[in-house]
Image (cartoon, rainbow, N blue to C red):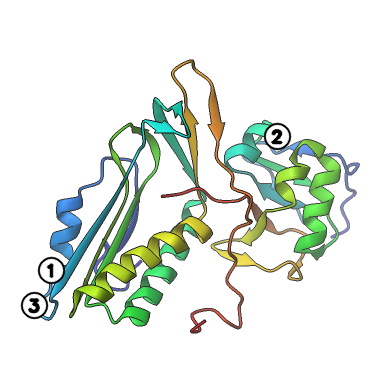
Amino acid sequence: MERGPAVDCLLLREPLDPARLLAAVSDAAAGGHVLFVGTTRGITDGVATSRLIYDAHEPLARGQLERLRAEAVGRFGLSRCVVHHRLGTVAVGEASVVIAASAPHRREAFAAAEWLMERIKEAVPIWKCEEHPDGSHRWVHPDAPPAVPHAAGRGAVS
Amino acid sequence: MNHPRPPTAASPAAPAAVPRHDGVRIGLFAGMAEAAGLRTLELAWDGGSAAALRRRLAEALPSLAPLLARSAVAIGDAYVTDDTPIPAGSDVAIIPPVSGG
């Protein structure tokens, strides 16, 4: 993570700071600044969640986050972009992921934040465990396998 | 490369295992670590593809088979594809479907 500001892509075991990320993408050339904050839901599919616990393959997750961040910057012509994801135990209502993106025009900043969230949910090795009020828990593993970038096509326009 | 290997059964890795010149060390995460009751394990392994490694692990720990069928494999900080050779002595991770965000 030595390229760019050291805060571009972080996995943190402490509360995220959306205002800090928004400030980090402030850019005089940008006309649109978008801040996305993903928070821990208290109810999923009608089942109450008391808290979430996030596990990660940290070196791989950092590398994938940086790869996707860099691809978003290029693909959408962003001025700046930062992504932080929480790990460990996260209380309901707290931020689990924050994306801040700035671009010369708003459309690209909105699109980049949406694109990045979709890619993060496909490819970055982070997993959530939902803990329920009765003490039970469930690791969330969707049906689709992780989206593994092909060596030859990595970063290519698709 | 000439050390005798134990039988093919999975065995929990000691926390500070003596470096091996054969076998493969496997990291597990999330629901897979829970299903296996292990974060890491070692299997006897003479080398083969990432897909073959997944099959080998499913044989050793059948409770992992459903998630293994839709998992990726990583070496170090990079994903590998199913046909990537995994040499003996590798340190790999099994990456089940992700749920970040």
- Dot 2 lies on which element? helix
Residue A138 position, x and y percent, is 55, 31
Residue A116 position, x and y percent, is 39, 65
Residue assigned mark 3: A28
State the residue in front, B64 or B39: B64
State the residue in front, A93 or A153: A93
Tell me the amino acid under the disc marked 2: Ala
Mark linked to residue A132: none
Residue A59 position, x and y percent, is 48, 57
Quadrant of image for the N terminus of chain A = bottom left
At x 77%, y 54%, the residue is B54
At x 12%, y 81%, the residue is A29
What is the chain identity of the residue bearing mark 2?
Answer: B
Which numbered mark, 3 or 2, is in the foreground of this view?
Answer: 3
- Single out the residue that lies furthest toward the top: A134
Residue assigned mark 1: A26
Residue assigned mark 2: B36
At x 16%, y 54%, the residue is A20
Disc 3 and disc 1: Cα gap in Å? 7 Å
Q: Is residue B70 left or right of residue B88?
A: left
Residue A106 position, x and y percent, is 20, 73
Tell me the amino acid under the disc marked 3: Ala
Q: Are marks 3 and 2 in contact (CB under 8 Å)?
A: no
The answer to which quarter of the image holds residue A22 is bottom left
The answer to which quarter of the image holds residue A88 is top left
Tell me the amino acid under the disc marked 1: Ser
**Label 2 crowd (10 A; few <14 / some 14-19 / many >=20):** some
Task: Confirm whether circles 3 and 2 share one chain.
Answer: no
**Label 3 crowd (10 A; few <14 / some 14-19 / many >=20):** few
**Label 1 crowd (10 A; few <14 / some 14-19 / many >=20):** some
- Dot 3 lies on which element? loop
